[in-house]
Image (tube, helix red, strand yellow):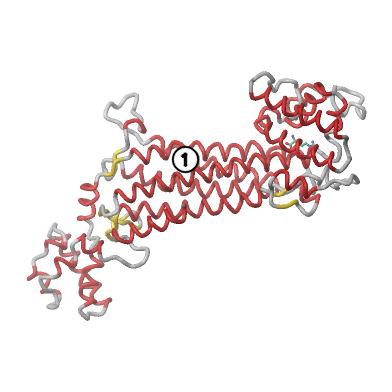
């Protein structure tokens, strides 16, 4: 028998029951639903809306339900429409009339909005901690490779010499912003919708501030229509998670390139790679490919939420039940990705010789050659042209700038002296790039120190 049976003359069709039910996916919010109900009952009692005796029965009953669920004694199979009805029905079965009083001055509309916020508060904190751990892992890797010279790229063409430490620290900066963004979303999650009731508040003398205190939230929503129909916090979270995944995906793409034989800048640990069912030589970076692939999935979740909300009139509409699978999936996916990514990065071995070899080809010191002349008074545009002509000469003669004989240099400008070789050595090129935020080993160590200080 449905709770709304008074109004209806017919039983609900079986197909509607299963179509309508969110229990299979919202049951994961059972703890949060109970926590919200305990706060609500405490407030109702304090305001003399329910008796002390009923309140005690309710809270004890809810706590017992919680224990039974956690111990596997109570399973989600009573055919309830959602987790809220499941728990209320179970409570009433256990404690009778007091259970029927719990829903005074509340609706499932403000209840579900609260539950999702409580759930996401917890999950967002977890993701922030995981991002922090990922940042620490990358800082460690950057420290190990703070002076390892590698080519920096633009257009995936070798551009200028940098250090591996510098390259990794670029991702740390992205992740620091992700962490900050998630922290801001977390503050907006912690707003109490309870007390909005179905849409129009209530005539009972409720105390919403007390509920806020009990749940340790920041504030209460200031408009009851907005309180029950706002899912901005889900969208903001999915959006921050999408940006985070985009960063993981870019790093994954680089790792995929770096462990190909064409680069071989790194070697992934066997325990974090996979083989082929037919090609015996293969060692594949599946984890990073999956992260790249799952990024699209999280974007999809964001899109689901945005599209779900865009045409909804105020206030609650059942469309909004679809919020949960999308945001749960986004959070689950991100957690799964980071959890695997951290040990994969931690066990990844860099191959400095190969990076150094790649850096020695591709004329990545051509800018430094131009700068050498500029520092001796040649206007930069002229120096740029001389340097370019020398690169062309090297290509024709199958050599690199470091190996051009001094007589040849002098044909293009008599300003060239013996000291040019030191000026364009990759070590000099990297070590002297000491501008703030630059790739020199000193700068990398400074970046690592600054991040570690911010984290601690
Ligand atoms: N299961 C619903 C959801 O997830 C709970 C709210 C239902 N409210 C209603 N008036 N039908 O959104």
Q: Residue at x 58, y 44 (%)?
A: 124
Residue sitting at the far top: 73
Q: Position of residue 381 (x, y in %)?
A: 27, 76
Residue 159, compared with residue 63, is above or below; it is below
Q: With respect to residue 92, does 327 lie above or below?
A: below
| 281 or 178, nearer to the observer | 178
| Residue 157, image quadrant | bottom left
- Position of 302 with respect to 311 (left or right) is left
Residue at numbered disc 1: 338
Q: Is residue 399 above or below residue 90?
A: below
Query: Is label 1 in a helix, a strand or a loop?
Result: helix
Quadrant of the rendering where the N terminus is positioned: top right
Classed neighbour count for the residue bearing mark 1: other residues with Cα under 10 Å, few (<14), some (14–19), many (≥20): some
Residue 80 percent across, percent down from the top left: 76, 25
Quadrant of the rendered image containing residue 366: bottom left
* Quadrant of the rendered image containing residue 92: top right
| Left or right side of 186 for 398 | left
Q: Residue at x 31, y 41 (%)?
A: 259
């Amino acid at each position: 028998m449905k709770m709304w049976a008074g109004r209806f003359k017919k039983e609900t069709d079986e197909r509607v029951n299963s179509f309508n039910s969110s229990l299979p996916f919202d049951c994961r919010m059972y703890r949060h639903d109970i926590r919200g109900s305990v706060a609500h009952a405490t407030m109702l009692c304090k305001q003399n809306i329910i008796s002390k005796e009923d309140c005690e029965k309710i809270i004890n009953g809810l706590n017992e339900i919680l224990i039974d669920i956690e111990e596997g004694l109570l399973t989600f199979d009573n055919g309830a429409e959602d987790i809220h009805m499941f728990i209320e029905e179970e409570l009433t079965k256990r404690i009778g009339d007091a259970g029927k009083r719990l829903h005074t001055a509340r609706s499932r509309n403000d209840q579900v909005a609260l539950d999702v916020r409580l759930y996401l508060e917890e999950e967002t904190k977890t993701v922030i901690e995981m991002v922090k751990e990922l940042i620490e892992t990358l800082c460690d890797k950057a420290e190990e490779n703070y002076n390892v010279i590698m080519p920096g790229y633009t257009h995936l063409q070798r551009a200028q010499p940098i250090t591996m430490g510098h390259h990794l620290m670029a991702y740390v900066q992205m992740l620091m912003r992700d962490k900050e963004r998630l922290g801001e979303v977390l503050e907006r999650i912690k707003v109490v919708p309870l007390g909005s009731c179905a849409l129009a508040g209530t005539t009972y003398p409720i105390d919403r501030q007390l509920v806020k205190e009990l749940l340790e939230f920041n504030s209460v929503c200031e408009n009851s229509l907005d309180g029950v129909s706002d899912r901005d916090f889900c969208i903001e979270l999915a959006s921050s998670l999408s940006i985070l995944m985009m960063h993981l995906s870019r790093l994954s793409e680089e790792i995929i390139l770096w462990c190909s034989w064409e680069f071989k800048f790194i070697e992934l640990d066997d325990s974090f790679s996979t083989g082929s069912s037919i090609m015996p030589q293969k060692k594949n970076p599946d984890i990073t490919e999956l992260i790249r692939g799952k990024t699209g999935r999280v974007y999809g979740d964001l899109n689901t939420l945005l599209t779900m909300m865009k045409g909804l009139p105020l206030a609650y509409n059942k469309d909004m039940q679809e919020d949960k699978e999308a945001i749960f999936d986004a959070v689950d996916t991100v957690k799964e990705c980071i959890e695997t990514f951290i040990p994969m990065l931690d066990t990844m071995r860099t191959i400095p010789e190969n990076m150094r070899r790649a850096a020695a080809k591709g004329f990545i010191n051509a800018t430094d050659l131009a700068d050498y002349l500029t520092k001796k008074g040649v206007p930069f545009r002229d120096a740029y042209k001389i340097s370019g002509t020398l690169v062309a000469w090297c290509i024709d003669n199958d050599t690199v700038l470091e190996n051009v004989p001094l007589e040849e240099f002098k044909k293009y400008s008599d300003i060239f002296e013996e000291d040019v070789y030191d000026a364009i050595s990759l070590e000099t090129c990297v070590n002297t790039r000491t501008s703030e935020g630059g790739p020199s080993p000193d700068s990398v160590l400074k970046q690592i120190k600054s991040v570690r200080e911010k984290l601690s």
